[in-house]
Amino acid sequence: MSRTSTRAPRSCPTRPREFRRLRRQVRALRRAGVDYDDPAAEAAYYARAKPVIEAVISATAGGMRGLKVKIEALVWCAAGVDFGLGETLGERVIGSILDDLVREAGLEP
């Protein structure tokens, strides 16, 4: 009996120049001052953020530098989330990995 994989084939890592551009964009999102009391300003902010985060998601890290950009995007997306609050052991392991990666990237959740 053969075992088939449902994983997508690995793609080539995204070029370092592209990750540098994405890192600048993610950091700009993290620094942006947004008036969350103004629905139009908040909507415009998230409209600007969505293509940046989607580009980070679709990029292939290829190493720790690219992974750090993805971690910065995760910290932006999950601001204030405690990754260790999983219900199952598997979720808690994932949370532990995310916490370690955030610290490795020099960020705090």
Image: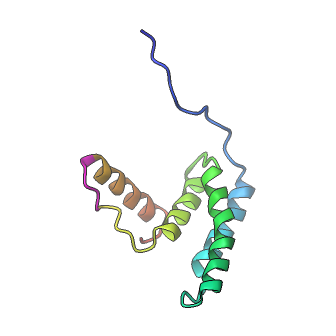
Work out which residue is located at the far front of the displayed protein and give it: 39
Task: Give the percent coordinates (x, y) of residue 49.
Answer: 64, 70
Residue 72, placed above or below residue 92: below
Q: Which is the main secondary structure of the residues drawn in magenta?
A: loop
Placement of the C terminus among the 4 image quadrants:
bottom left
> In this image, 64 relative to 81: left or right?
right
Task: Give the percent coordinates (x, y) of residue 36.
Answer: 54, 86
* Magenta segment: 85-89
Identity of the residue drawn at 55% across and 54% down: 67
What's the image's color scheme?
A: rainbow
Is residue 86 covered in magenta? yes
Q: Nearer the viewer, residue 26 or 38?
A: 38
Placement of the N terminus among the 4 image quadrants:
top left
Q: Quadrant of residue 31?
A: bottom right
Identity of the residue drawn at 70% across and 54% down: 16
Q: Nearer the viewer, residue 105 or 88?
A: 88
Tell me if residue 18 can be seen. Answer: yes
Is residue 69 covered in magenta? no
Task: Give the percent coordinates (x, y) of residue 95.
Answer: 35, 56
> In this image, 98 relative to 9: left or right?
left
Q: Nearer the viewer, residue 16 or 81?
A: 81
Identity of the residue drawn at 55% across and 52% down: 64
Residue 96, placed above or below residue 40: above
Q: How many marks?
A: 0
Q: Quadrant of residue 46?
A: bottom right
Residue 27, placed above or below residue 84: below
Identity of the residue drawn at 50% across and 25% down: 5
Task: Give the percent coordinates (x, y) of residue 92.
Answer: 29, 53
Q: Quadrant of residue 80?
A: bottom left
Tell me if residue 32 can be seen. Answer: no
